[in-house]
Image (cartoon, grey):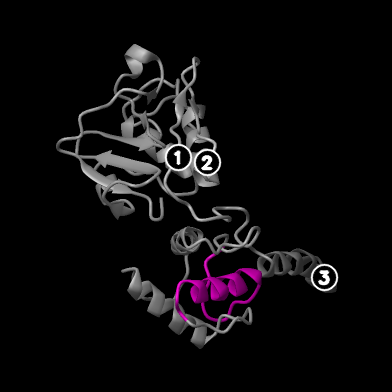
Amino acid sequence: MAGTVTALAALVVPSIAQAAGAHLGQRTLKIGMHGHDVRVLQDYLGVVGVDTSVDGQYGPGTAKSVKSWERQVQLKPNGIVTRTTARVLIRLVAVAGAAKPGDNGGALAGPVIGPPTGKATLAPDGTAIPPADAPAVVQQVIAAGNAIAHKPYVYGGGHGQWTDSGYDCSGSVSYALHGGNLLDVQEDSTTLESFGDPGPGQWITIYANSGHTFMLVAGLRFDTSGLSQDGTRWHDTPHPTSGYVVRHPTGL
């Protein structure tokens, strides 16, 4: 029996230590938890204007601050920070120019994310080249788009699993957004009508309706429309936007 307990402890203790040193967004945070990610959460709440003690302990005070911030950004005020909630906060801090490198595992840390000074370009092989000033998250979205740029169109492809033999329009957009850690689960074109925030973004703009979806990433169109002609999902030509709902990822 003692040997079994010792063996279990050897497994559990490292996992606790790993959780305590987790980056913000790697696990769901709630009352009773502690660690590096809790400290970063508390710090970031202060950055966005919600006064919070920074002690690494997720107590009632931190939960109250989280609820206050959730109300400000029109999220359900439950005091629980999921991976999705954390990404919203991380993006807002990045936009404020106050994110500290390494605090969130490298996602969106760095300077203020301003509008592009350049535009993504279409390479001869049909992949996209991001502009020099593209933030890390935009480069990741483009890299994910490049990974499936030449995959065939398959109705329903990319839904239910990220790695697939082909992708439809919403499966393609979902895959690229997932590459930038902007989406946890695949969404269809109708669901993408309510993704993120309304209106065009500075870096990424999503166009969606009940029948089709595509997006502009740093000015370059990522779209299954034209795939059969061009052999790629990236296009440097415009697409009609009438009848589409226009959305963008928060902060981008």
Q: Residue at x 46, y 32 (%)?
A: 145
**Residue annotated with mark 2:** 133
**Residue annotated with mark 3:** 6
Query: Which amino acid type is shown beneath numbered disc 1?
Result: Thr
On screen, 221 above or below 196? above
Asked whether residue 159 is in view, the answer is no
Asked whether residue 64 is in view, the answer is yes
Q: Residue at x 45, y 79 (%)?
A: 50
Residue 47 lies in the magenta-colored region: yes
Query: Which amino acid type is shown beneath numbered disc 3?
Result: Thr
| Residue 45 percent coordinates (x, y) | 49, 74
Which is more toward the observer, 119 or 21?
Answer: 119
Residue located farthest toward the bottom when viewing the structure as drawn? 60
On screen, 250 above or below 190? below
Which is more toward the observer, 245 or 161?
Answer: 245
Label 1 or label 3, whichever lies nearer to me, is 1
Q: Which residues are magenta?
A: 27-50
Label 2 or label 1, whichever lies nearer to me, is 1
Q: Residue at x 48, y 52 (%)?
A: 113
Which is more toward the observer, 141 or 59?
Answer: 141
**Residue annotated with mark 1:** 117
Of the image marks 3 and 2, the number of the one nearer the N terminus: 3
Mark 2 and mark 1: Cα distance apart in space: 7 Å
Q: Residue at x 34, y 44 (%)?
A: 187
Residue 150 lies in the magenta-colored region: no
On screen, 188 above or below 249? above
